[in-house]
Image (cartoon, rainbow, N blue to C red):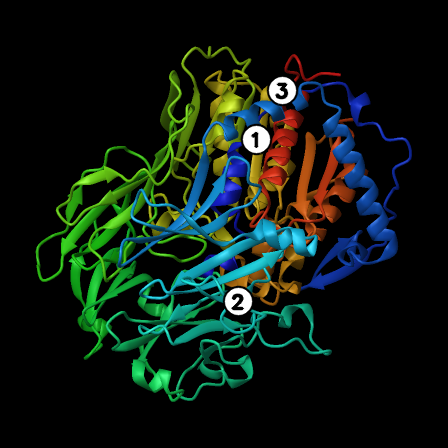
Amino acid sequence: MTSRMKLNASSLLRQVTVAFVAAGCGAAALAQAAALPVAPVRTVTDTYHGVRIDDPYRYFENKNDPAVARWMKAHSEHAHAVLARIPGRQALLEKIQRYDAATSERVAQITRVPGELYFIERRGAADNQYKLALRRGLTGVDRLLVDPEAVEKKTGQPHAINWYMPSADGARLAYGLSAQGSEAAVLHLLDTRTGRPIGRPITRAEFGGVDWSPDGTHVVVNRLRAPRAKDKATDKYQHSQVWLLRAGRPIAEAKPVFGTATRGVDIKPAEIPIVSFTHDGRWALGMVINGTQRELGLYVAPQAGVLAGKPVWKRVLKPSNAVTGVAYFDDTLYMVSHLGAPRSKVLAMRLDEPDVQKAEPVMPASERVVVNVAAASDALYIEARDGNIKRLYKRPHGTTGAPVEVKLPLEGSFELVNSEGGASAANPRLPGVLIDLQSWNAARQVYEVAADGSVRNTGLQPAGPYDQPPGIVATEVKVKSHDGALVPMSIIHRADVKLDGSNPTILYGYASYGSTEEPFYSLSRLAWLDQGGVYAIANPRGSSVYGEEWYRAGFQATKPNTWKDFIACAEYLVAQKYTSPSKLGILGGSAGGILVGMAMVERPDLFAAVIPAVGALDMLRMETTANGVPNIPEFGSVKTEAGFKSLLAMSPYAHIKPGTAYPAVLLTHGVNDPRVEVWTSTKTAARLMAATTSGKPVLLRLEYDAGHGIGSTKKQQLEERADMLSFFLWQMGVAGFQP
């Protein structure tokens, strides 16, 4: 649930990023504008700990200012027009669309409940948005439950499912729906047997955190505080509370059961409270999340008291216990902790006598990086990482031996717990787990791991003709960085690519929050490989590919290692003749904007083109935004001298220098972005336009019906991918994309 606060591209944005291609230094005439408005400089000077910082475009932070709005609209329309005129762009879009339509449908989150019921988020080849269906048995007929496209027809605005949670028996469903990429979810309850709504929709359910009582009569949900006239932007996510509601009753009857106002708990205003119920009816688990901080706090209370609206909470975990993931079964709490274990370990603690100091080891620390745990009725399942390859382990309940590895049919990646919605691949009422397994050159398929350890393809994800294209090479290398650290990088290309320095190449990275780039498949990347391109993915410090130490080596004061590692990877690609600077593009989304933005301002000579997608680019001003406060644990605060120095060092906007020959830049952003405000891109675009002397374009591509990428329609996604690919190919001088 913490990832809702992150400046995270999410799995969806990762799919977008793979779509991006490299393009060359075509004629600047294509980007010439007849009469684009020039942003006047209106400098505001701030003094941080004795250091004066000039901000020439502070007024851009008011996107509703008429002059700013006109500037945004004009430049966005110009960018869309320029991109649409790139030769080859339309053909490339049609190829991406053809690849996508060749598979009958795509499935996203799948949830199993007893009775052979499968809740499936699915998007057919002709659909524009994921819908939620219910299926009995693996081969049963789907019954549509939630259709965002039908909502769009009624409202005129695109809608998306943010999250969902069925009751234990599947008879009832809670789901969040939001409009125009805003992620401002509204909670809906549904009777899955009749298809009728239960009660009225409930607003301000942005974080979700929804769970049902075991009998399906009550639901808990985190709600934001009602906005007040005196509120500042930074107040939006403060003092959220968990409310208990009897399904079907008015929200006015709901009771607050966990939050800053709850007796006996210590929850700060910026912390996010989440409550879940254990399947056996014994406990309520009260999780406390400090914004984007990975280490969580946890309280427990007898479930009966919470359901009566009179909880008695007891604290069992603090962030200092360094626990980043938990699972529950049979009065035992299983925990992933990096305390004294940089690559993490698994511990077990009884909740009837909770004492984390006496927790017993389940999987001790080793060279593997333990990622997460999930409990099924037969066993505890453990997700670990060996480099960037995932491993699955299980330990049957009632045994004390070491967890045993489950042999998977493919070396690649999967998630036991969905990083965005928090849904688990396991159900404590059912044996085994469902995992979605994929690799660099094999498309995602959904597998069932049975209690006996056997693994089978469920067929829930239909196969397609482009699922395993022949002749694709994926090479894993380690690159020496500025201080000798060895940075892992994956390089993907067709087998017939020649290492002569002429290949258009895209280098992608993220490296914040400990997020690690693992093998994933993309049809958009296949379209890029069709152009003879190379696609490289780096895991600089700031990711956790090697655990907590690797993450902390690219964190706040050590954040410069992140882009210096990235620059080293770019230099490696040139030195090994995969590409050359005139054929090299870099891409980063969200917090990856720090990575590519700083690489650009430090080494503008190294790259032909740069794309920060929904990028975090003005880090000194980030904490003035609603989602900036929850990100202080990750990036720091200007209120401390150390925090200011770190944020200044990692802020691309602050390092743009007049009179510099910058590469071509395409900034993309959704105007309704709740995670990274659109003005981070508009300010950066204006400053780059005024500063660069290269004559290469600086384009600002905005979507007015989108946000951070979560909830974007298929049409929006595929068109953006084609625009990005075409921009890179144009700027890299690739034949067929030049005016």
Does residue 396 appear to the left or right of 169 in the view shown? left
How far, Cα to Cα, is label 1 from label 2?
Answer: 34 Å
Residue drawn at the location 24% of the way across and 62% of the way down: 428
Tell me, yes or no, whether the two marked residues, 1 and 3, touch with CB atoms within 8 Å: no
Does residue 128 appear to the left or right of 736 in the view shown? left
Q: Position of residue 143 (x, y in %)?
A: 43, 51
Q: Earlier in the sequence, mark 1 or mark 3?
A: 1
Q: Nearer the viewer, residue 139 or 336?
A: 139
Q: Which residue is mark 2?
A: 187
Above/below status of 43 relative to 238: above
Q: Nearer the viewer, residue 162 or 59?
A: 162
Disc 3 secondary structure class? helix
Q: Position of residue 168 (x, y in %)?
A: 32, 66
What amino acid type is highlighted by mark number 2? Answer: Leu
Does residue 391 appear to the left or right of 67 in the view shown? left
What amino acid type is highlighted by mark number 3? Answer: Ser
Q: Quadrant of the N terminus?
A: bottom left
